[in-house]
Structure formats: C-alpha cells, structure tokens
Image (spheres, coloured by chain):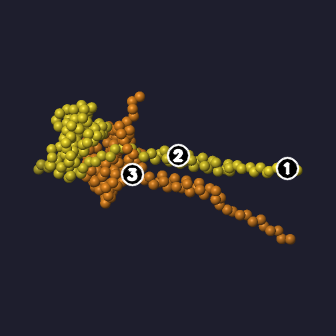
C-alpha cells in the first residue's frame, strides 16, 4: 500500500506587522508611564464664614507653628508628643465644632513642616482651621 | 486581435487601519491633557501616608520661586478665589477637588492665603505629596 504523505502547511505569522506592533507597544507603555496618577492627602478646611461662627461658639485648641517650635494653647510641645497631647485635649469633645484646631503659622514656616504638623493634628482627630493675620490698610490724609 | 489592457487595482491596505486608529487615539489622549503644568518647577513635600488623588477640577501650584499658578498660568492671590469660584460653579460636593502643588520650601506667607482662597471658593483641597521613603 502506498502511503500518502501529508502536505505540511507553513504557518508563520506575517513578519511585516511585527515592527508596527513593537512600535505601538512602545508608544502605549510610554504614555502609560507619563500619566502616573498624583498622590496626596485630602484636607477638609471649613470655609472662612463657617469657622468664624464656630470659633464664637466654643473655645478651640490653638496650635502655633514656627520653623522650630510647636506651641499648643501657649505651651511648647515636642513634635513626638503632639499627637498624644492633642488626643487628650480632644477627648470627650464629640461635636465637630469642638474638634476644630486653629493653626496659626509663623510667616517663615515651610510647607513641608506645615504638612507634617497638620498631618499629626488630623491623626489626633482635629479639624484644621487656619488663623491668618489680618492686614488692614488705612489712608491718612 | 485586440489586446486587453491589464487592469491595476489600487486598494488601501486594510491591515494598517488598526494601527492608525490606535495611534490616533493615543495622539488625541495626549492632546486632551490640556492642563500641562510640566513647566512649573516644584519639589513635593512628603508624608508618611498618601492616597491616590481624585480627578481635579482645578490645579493650584506654587513653584520654587513662590509664584502662584492656576491651571498652569500665573495668577495673583487676590484673583485666585474669584477664578476658582467661576471654575467650580454649581458642582456638587465630591466633585470640587482642587489639587494643591506647593514646593516643600515655600513659606507660610505664600501658601496660606492660597489655601484660604481655595477654602473660600468651596474647593475640596487635595495636597499633592510624595510618600516618605524609609531611610536606608
């Protein structure tokens, strides 16, 4: 009996498209790498009119911030003890308006330090509110 | 005998269509990123824990020279609140995120009035930070 040999089919992917595919993949990954999402921290800061009302209603904790010192209600506190100090001060305060912590920064306080300290205040359960120095201009005739 | 002319068929190669469409998509995607703030020189502050920031309606930045930017263009702090109020308009809560990019050395006299303006305009402040790397 004669054995019929099967015809072998050459199955090869089209090589002409390979460079196109490679190029598209490069562009795709390049775009993905350049569109990295930002990371950060949300911060709830009450509106100015709201905070004026709240500060009238209750006596809030005041944190004064300088490039070197942190002063809580007039008393210097080391950075490592700030969270525990604020936690004890905020203990028993259940109303959101009572948890408001007024942050007054020295003009020279750098942003990095401000972020660190306000992060600690928030981790202690405080709600950050800024206390800015008001500037008034008067014209003298 | 009449010799028939050879008919040449000019067809558009359909194989490349997918590639072209894909490249067009990427091109349009890059164009859509209109708020390009890559020209602003700033170094982000660090924090121990950071989250992926939500999509922002506006982006406020203060560069290393303490210049204030709104969506990539220089602006004065006096008009920041008005411009932000216009941008945020009637957006509901949860869709009023304002990204705040500040160089880590910027003193409080520059960034605090900007925070106040964002707060007054009803913006939901998101500080753009980097995660603190553990010391080797």
Q: Nearer the viewer, mark 1 or mark 3?
A: 1
Q: Do labels 1 and 2 share a chain?
A: yes
Left-right relation of A66 to B9: left
**Do residues under tags 1 and 3 come within 8 Å of each other at their CB atoms?**
no
The label shown at residue A3 is 1
> Could you tell me residue B121's position as x and y percent?
27, 54
Give whichever of A104, B5 is nearer the camera.
A104
What residue is shown at x 27% (from left), y 42% (from top)? A122
| Chain hosting mark 2 | A
| Chain seen in yellow | A
What distance separates the C-alpha of mark 1 from that of mark 3?
A: 70 Å
Q: Mark 2 points at which residue?
A: A29
The answer to whether one can see residue B69 in this image is no
| Chain seen in orange | B
> Is residue B64 depicted above or below B124 in this figure?
above
Left-right relation of A68 to A8: left
Q: What element carries label 1?
A: loop
Picture quadrant where residue B13 is located? bottom right
How crowded pointer 2 is (Cα within 10 Å; few <14, some 14-19, many 20+) is rated as few
What distance separates the C-alpha of mark 3 from that of mark 2?
A: 22 Å
What distance separates the C-alpha of mark 1 from that of mark 2?
A: 53 Å
Q: Is mark 2 on a helix, strand or loop?
A: helix
Give whichever of A62, B19 is nearer the camera.
A62
> Could you tell me residue B103's position as x and y percent?
34, 40
Q: Is mark 3 on a helix, strand or loop?
A: loop
Q: Mark 3 points at which residue?
A: B55
Of all residues, the one furthest to the front in this rendering is: A1
């Amino acid at each position: 009996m004669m054995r019929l040999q099967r015809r072998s089919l050459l199955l090869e992917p089209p090589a002409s498209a390979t460079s196109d595919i490679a190029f598209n993949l490069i562009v795709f990954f390049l775009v993905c790498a350049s569109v990295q999402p930002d990371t950060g921290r949300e911060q709830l800061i009450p509106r100015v009119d709201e905070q004026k009302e709240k500060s009238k209603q209750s006596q809030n904790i005041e944190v004064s911030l300088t490039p070197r010192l942190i002063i809580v209600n007039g008393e210097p506190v080391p950075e490592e003890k700030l969270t525990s100090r604020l936690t004890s001060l905020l203990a028993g305060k259940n109303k959101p308006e009572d948890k408001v912590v007024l942050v007054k920064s020295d003009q020279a306080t750098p942003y990095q330090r401000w972020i660190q300290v306000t992060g600690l205040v928030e981790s202690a359960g405080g709600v950050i509110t800024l206390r800015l120095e008001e500037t008034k201009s008067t014209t003298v005739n | 005998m009449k010799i028939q002319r050879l008919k040449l068929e000019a067809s558009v190669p359909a194989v490349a269509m997918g590639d072209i469409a894909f490249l067009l998509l990427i091109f349009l995607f890059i164009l859509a990123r209109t708020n390009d703030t890559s020209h602003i020189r700033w170094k982000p502050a660090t924090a121990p824990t950071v989250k992926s920031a939500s999509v922002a309606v506006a982006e406020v930045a203060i560069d290393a020279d303490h210049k204030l930017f709104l969506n990539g263009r220089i602006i004065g702090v006096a008009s920041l609140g008005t411009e932000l109020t216009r941008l945020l308009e009637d957006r509901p809560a949860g869709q009023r995120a304002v990204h705040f990019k500040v160089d880590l050395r910027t003193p409080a006299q520059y960034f605090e009035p900007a925070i106040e303006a964002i707060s007054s305009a009803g913006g939901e402040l998101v500080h753009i930070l980097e995660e603190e790397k553990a010391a080797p």
